[in-house]
Amino acid sequence: MPGILVYSANAGLARELLTAAAGVAAAGPGQSAPVYALTLGEGCQPDELGGARVRAATAPVSIGDVAAVAGAVAAAARKLDCGIVLLGGDRRGKELAGRVGEKLGAGVVSGVTGFEPGEDGTVARRDALGGAVVERCVVATPTAVFAVAPRCFAEAPAAGEPQVEPIDLPASSSNVRVVGREAKPAGGVDVAAANVLVAVGCGFAEREAALGAEALATRLGGAVGCSKPLATDRGWLGEDRVIGISGKSCAPQLALLLGVSGQVQFWAGVRDAKTIIAVNTDEGAPAMAMADYSLVGDVREVLPGLLAAIG
């Protein structure tokens, strides 16, 4: 039966996709579908995927060239007779999904949070209308491409050595020429991986006050995230800190929302937190109604009190 192809340049996302693929394969009719993981260029390497069935491309492909990667993924899907392609749903993965779908003539669903069997094929679940509802999607084309949102599946355990087989893919023409690479500046934070998240919003009028949340996050062993305007409009924090539909989906044990109104665009990225505490001057703000605990107050006054209480 048609197989399932998994690809992400990020090792953690690739392992999450392997968990998702195993569930999709087991839910299919008859025997389980074969699952393949594809590795390309300088991205995720076979030894990072444990006991997975890895196909390592022999053609040189730069992961910075999304068009070339899309060509390689599509070629691998055809060569391995895969009816489902699972890609990481980060920013680059969403673009890649559309390109792969175009090359395969396949239907594409992005932002997938789960799968379930259906009478007409695999059903993909995703948030819609800003997270207000869950949408169930079935792809009608013979091949389906799904971009899976990060942290919706556990990472597959590294059981044994990967079963690595080379796969010869055609060289992909591209107008992109890689002239060099630079490492990201040190100190980057992955808010999606934090167990404690301190999120700051427009309730802070001064940049210095908002950055004071960093001290609170450090004492709690967490990370600082923000609503979109603080990154894109005010430029106080990097866009990698944005939470919500336009940023990261987070599922921490504790989310402390300071001066965040909690509109649906933001809420979709934090609603899976185990415990949510909101502080806002507006008791009618959406975040206050949805939080487990809420405090009406000015974050500029509450934050110093929290720091003093923690010590």
Image: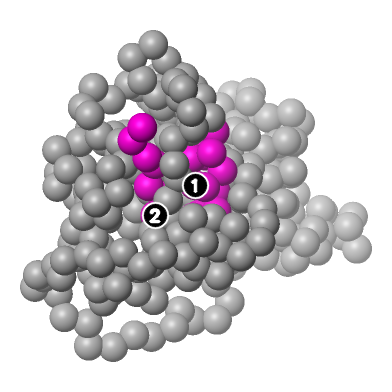
Q: Residue at x 48, y 40 (%)?
A: 21
Residue 248 percent coordinates (x, y): 49, 49
Q: Residue 8 magenta-drawn?
A: yes
Instruction: Name which quarter of the figure residue 55 lies in.
Output: bottom left
Residue at numbered disc 1: 17
Residue that sits furthest to the bottom in the current view = 180
Q: Is 57 placed above or below 191 here?
A: below
| Span highlighted in magenta in the image | 1-23
Looking at the rendered structure, the kind of residue marked 2 is Tyr
Among the two numbered marks 2 and 1 on one chain, the one whose residue lies closer to the N terminus: 2
Relative placement, left or right, of 247 versus 176 is right
Q: Is residue 198 above or below residue 240?
A: above
**Mark 2, residues whose alpha carbon is within 10 Å: few (<14), some, or many (≥20)?**
many
Q: Residue at x 61, y 65 (%)?
A: 161
Residue 239 visible in the current orientation: no
Q: What percent of the width, then of the height, locates residue 287? A: 60, 31
Q: Secondary structure at mark 1?
A: helix
Residue 73, located in which quarter of the rendered image?
Answer: bottom left
Helix or strand or loop: what does disc 2 sit on?
A: strand
Residue at image mark 2 = 7
Total number of numbered discs in the rendering: 2
Q: Nearer the viewer, residue 174 or 75?
A: 75
The x, y position of residue 283, in whole percent, is 64, 27
Mark 1 and mark 2 in contact (Cβ < 8 Å)?
yes
Q: Is residue 249 covered in magenta?
A: no
Q: Residue at x 22, y 47 (%)?
A: 78
Label 2, label 1: how far apart the Cα atoms are? 8 Å
Q: Is residue 180 visible?
A: yes
Quadrant showing the N terminus: top left
Q: Amino acid at mark 1?
A: Leu
